[in-house]
Image (cartoon, helix red, strand yellow):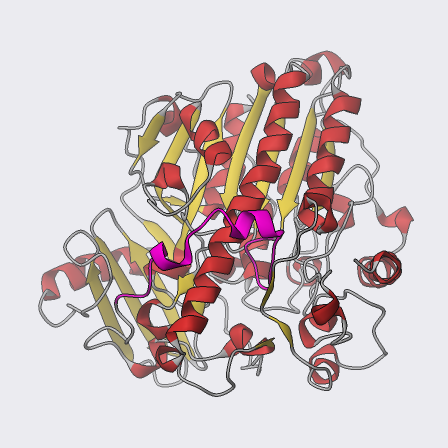
Amino acid sequence: MNLGRRTRRAVTSLLAFTMLTGAPQAFAKEAPAASQAQAAARPNILFILIDDLKPAIHGYSDPTAITPNIDRLIARGTRFDLAYANQAVCAPSRLNLMSGARSTSSGIYDFGMNLRDFMPNTVTLPQYFMKAGYRAESMGKVFHIGHGTVGDPQSFSVPPHKDHVIEYVSPEALAVGHTREEALFNEFELPDEDVWEFSRTLPKGVAWEDPDVPDDAYADGRTAQYAIGRLDALKGSKQPFFLAVGFARPHLPFSVPKKYWNMYDPAKLPMPQFERMPEGAPDFAGKVGGEINAYTPVPPETPEAQYPDELKRKLIHGYYAGVSYTDAQIGKVLDELERTGLAENTIVVLWGDHGYHLGDHAIWTKHTNYEQAAHQPLIFAGPGVAKGASTRQPAETVDIYPTLAALAGLPAPKGPQPMDGISLKPVLENGATRLRGYAYHFYNRPHRWGQAIRTEQYRLVRWTHDQTGERVFELYDLVNDPGETRNMAADKPEVVKELDAVLERQPKPKPLPKPKDKA
């Protein structure tokens, strides 16, 4: 393992992070609105964020996934079976979480569209808790930093503890040198030029590696150790904490220690079953290429359905290895929460920022309005949450902010940014409760709005051309056609009309940005 290079990269990454997010004096000074006595009575918050994790979790009925630690969190909390990202893109999804505003309310739809440029007075989720007397800390990947997007240091009491998202330790991968995706994630000091243009001058990184190394050879292992240290340091404090702990895997590249690859038999992995677009779907609704093409040995400009089976199997293997690696790191943090005696008074939330395509519909990664891209895991555990429960109440990422406030006994947040979510606290007390019959999500294509409503049975996607106003509909019955193989809009006009009326009642979306080539 090239420890010298990794150390140098950590230093240059920190320099790039400082340049993008501002000098240390920009970090928030706590001025709690609550008294010390009021704050001390509040529960702690441990918020676990996982990059690119769909519900590929054994406790979500995935028979392949090996996730004993997430499963035990589910056993002592409530699992949302129908939770959805408001937008299946890393940076906007995390801003949906932190602001409580949907992308269509903030106007933030893409990388390089930063929170304070669009909503400068936003009170973020951790800021709201800081105002109530909490100490807020961030470690690992919490805000998306990269692709022209910056973090938000004023959301935390102390400087965020950042680590790598793109990282290699094998000699073969390191021999490639700095890669395109490393540049986009600011993993080294960048020249003073457009990051997208500069990245295109660099080689592709490898899509996976499986060295025989300890967990902390990669960032997620180090993030878990840092979180353990912070829990130990805070266990005697009278000030409640809000700890945001972000893990990068199973995001590409699938750089995961060998022992997690060895947990899976490649021959028994689930291969894609439906490798074409849904019958009757508009051509622009799908996705070809993008992020997956930034890695080798993925063949360039090749339709994903034509990938060799060996490549498909390896990518799926890497994803599940990444899931189990992250699960192990989460287990270490949960163990420390128990060991310190903090678990009894700590609300734990586990959230995946969006879903992930693994070859279904001939698509890889995210960036669509289909179930695999939008569906995310969401788990609450701790004080005020029913144990061993699940619910089919549709939930959105923006619901988390008001829900956590309610669980902590705080007033409903009022912004000043748009607050699109609702408190799900009654559902966490009784999973049969229904507060809203749908979840809303969005993904755009050039000149087209893709607004979607997901109910317990259906998904309606309404594509609206931003110049002509032309509308095209997709309707899927997720009960009878869970793989979304056929667009049923023409067969069920009454369902289209009903769900379209729900879309009409939503706030009018902010204008779309000009199209940007991200391939």
Q: Is residue 341 visible?
A: yes
Q: How many marks?
A: 0
In the image, residue 35 above or below residue 213: above
Q: Residue visible at 26% across and 58% down?
A: 459
Q: In which quarter of the view is residue 147 placed?
A: bottom right
Could you say which is closer to the camera, residue 186 or residue 443? 186
Q: Is residue 188 above or below residue 203?
A: above
Residue 114 position, x and y percent, is: 67, 62
- Closer to us: 103 or 49: 49
Residue 258 position in % (x across, y down): 60, 52
Find the magenta span and give its range: 249-273
| Residue 61 in picture, x, y percent from top left | 32, 41
Describe residue 435's horizontal placement relative to residue 182 as left or right.
Answer: left
Magenta span has 71? no
Q: Where is residue 81 shown, x and y percent of the image? A: 33, 41
Q: Residue at x 19, y 70 (%)?
A: 487
Q: Name the main secondary structure of what is drawn in magenta.
A: loop
Classify the position of the C terminus by image quarter: bottom right
**Residue 412 at least partly seen:** no
Q: Is residue 260 magenta?
A: yes
> 418 left or right of 359?
right
> Which residue is pictured at 55% across the width and 25% down the height?
347
Q: Residue at x 29, y 38 (%)?
A: 392
